[in-house]
Image (cartoon, rainbow, N blue to C red):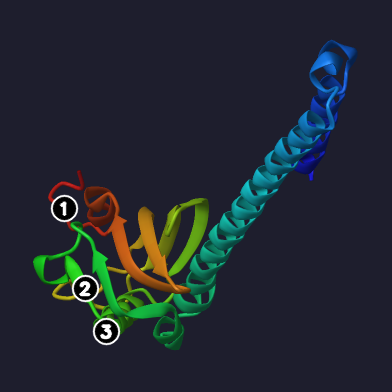
Amino acid sequence: MLVITLILIYFQFLSTIILSEEFDHKLRSSKMISQKIIILFCIILIFLLTLSCDDKMSSQLEKNKEIVRYIMEEGVNKQNLDVFDDILGENYIRHCQAMPPDYQEIKGVETMRQFLSQHFSAFPDWHEEIIFMVAEGDKVAYISRGTGTQTGSLGQIPATGKFVSVDNYIIQRLENGKIVESWVSWDNIYYLNQLGLLPGNL
């Protein structure tokens, strides 16, 4: 609304200058007046089209952020794996160098479901809260704080009964309303230290 108001003020100012006495001698012929009107109309049209494109882009960015919030609340925090079937793209891939070699790239929805199922079994009370989010183009980047107690085995790591709190740094790429690619990272030393898995609890 503020942008529209500023544009209208600008055009009013421009019209005043064009029709002022200073330029009166340039506008005496009807042909020149018509040319000025056409130019002014084109400028207005360009601004309105630009504004419309910006609105559409802003709307799409908000939709992408809503998709990420939805999969976090309904999929992760409610541990509903069916949500991932709906939101992840068919050729989904997840990149994470903090994971063991076999899980540094997770390809496909079913493989992602298996990974999440193991994680939720290890941390039945796992919960994540988004504390920062920004969107640009086809990507949404955010920081989420994950918390939970490891009461189940995590791969070859037996249950420790330890509570952890770790910040995850995530980028999601979306296509046609689906998340098709993820990049995930966190402080693994801090995470493992909370579980008591590092020598001397570094």
**Neighbourhood count class around disc 1 (C-alpha, 10 Å): few under 14, some 14–19, many 20 upward:** few
Q: Which residue is mark 2?
A: 106
Q: Spatial distance from mark 3 to mark 2, Cα to Cα?
A: 10 Å
Mark 3 or mark 1: which comes first in sequence? 3
Residue 54 or residue 185, whichever sits in front: 54
Check disc 3 and give the amino acid type: Gln
Residue 150 or residue 128, whichever sits in front: 128
* Closer to viewer: mark 2 or mark 1: 2
* Closer to viewer: mark 3 or mark 1: 3
Residue 200's place in the image compared with 10, above or below, is: below
Q: Secondary structure at mark 3?
A: helix
User: Among all residues in the image, which is located at the extreme top?
Assistant: 22
User: Among all residues in the image, which is located at the extreme left?
Assistant: 101
Instruction: Place residue 197 in its image quadrant.
Output: bottom left
Viewer can see residue 164? no
Q: Position of residue 72 (x, y in %)?
A: 48, 69
Viewer can see residue 90? yes
Mark 2 or mark 1: which comes first in sequence? 2
Q: Position of residue 60 (x, y in %)?
A: 56, 62
Mark 3 or mark 2: which comes first in sequence? 2
Residue 165's place in the image compared with 110, above or below, is: above
Q: Which residue is mark 1?
A: 198
Check disc 1 and give the amino acid type: Leu
Q: Spatial distance from mark 3 to mark 1, Cα to Cα?
A: 27 Å
Q: Which numbered dot is residue 114?
A: 3
